Image: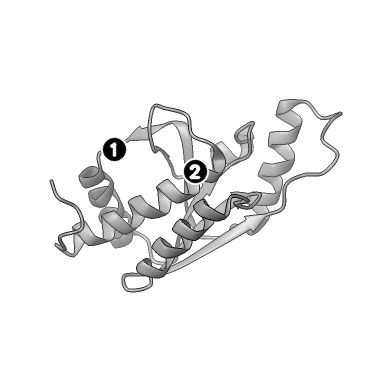
């Protein structure tokens, strides 16, 4: 089983990028994990928010494979505690046999087509974070979930 995080754009802030890489390296002890960054759209001045979301979603859909369990990181998704998220992932890992793909969208979210393709939606918080910070927060929470599932002391609850 492989976990994948698909993003629009890349993390520009070197501090956030460095921290994200640290957690990605830690994850190697628990699972196969890959980050796929899709380049941001160029010349978007003449595109409406929905047109931009549609074009970005089209790029995301091209990266998905048949059988992928797709989970959108979306403000309308389910909000979990860290323990609940670990349980959610455990169930996904036992019911999926291919890839579990998490997706962060661009500034304008996802198209209706991508919402229909998704198996689930998860919200990392009811607060809004920059897209660059969401990547770091997600990777840290994925690592935390793996340590919870292994009964390791990283998570103190």
| Pointer 1 residue | 80
In the rendered image, the vertical position of residue 71 relative to residue 123, given as above or below:
below
Observer-nearest of 148 and 122: 148
Q: CA distance from mark 2 to mark 1?
A: 18 Å
Nearer the observer, disc 2 or disc 1?
2
Residue found 86% across the figure and 39% down from its top: 43
Relative to 85, is 127 above or below?
above
> With 146 as the anchor, is 28 left or right in this view?
right
- Helix, strand or loop at label 2? It is helix
The residue to which callout 2 is attached is 133
Residue at image coords 60%, 34%: 109
Q: Residue furthest front?
A: 15
Query: Residue 107, relative to residue 56: is it above or below?
Result: above
User: So how many labels did they put on this image?
Assistant: 2
Q: Quadrant of residue 148?
A: bottom left
User: From where the camera sits, is residue 118 visible?
Assistant: no
Residue found 28% across the figure and 61% down from its top: 94
């Amino acid at each position: 089983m492989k976990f994948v995080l698909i993003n629009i754009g890349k993390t520009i802030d070197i501090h956030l990028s460095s921290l994200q890489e640290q957690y990605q390296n830690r994850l190697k002890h628990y699972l196969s994990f890959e980050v796929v960054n899709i380049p941001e759209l160029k010349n978007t001045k003449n595109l409406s928010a929905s047109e931009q979301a549609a074009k970005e979603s089209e790029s995301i859909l091209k990266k998905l494979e048949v059988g992928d369990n797709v989970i959108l990181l979306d403000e309308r998704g389910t909000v979990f505690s860290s323990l609940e998220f670990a349980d959610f992932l455990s169930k996904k890992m036992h019911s999926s046999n291919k890839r579990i793909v998490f997706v962060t969208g661009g500034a304008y979210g996802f198209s209706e087509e991508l919402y229909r393709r998704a198996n689930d939606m998860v919200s990392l918080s009811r607060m809004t974070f920059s897209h660059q910070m969401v990547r770091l927060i997600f990777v840290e929470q994925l690592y935390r979930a793996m340590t919870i599932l292994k009964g390791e002391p990283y998570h103190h609850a």
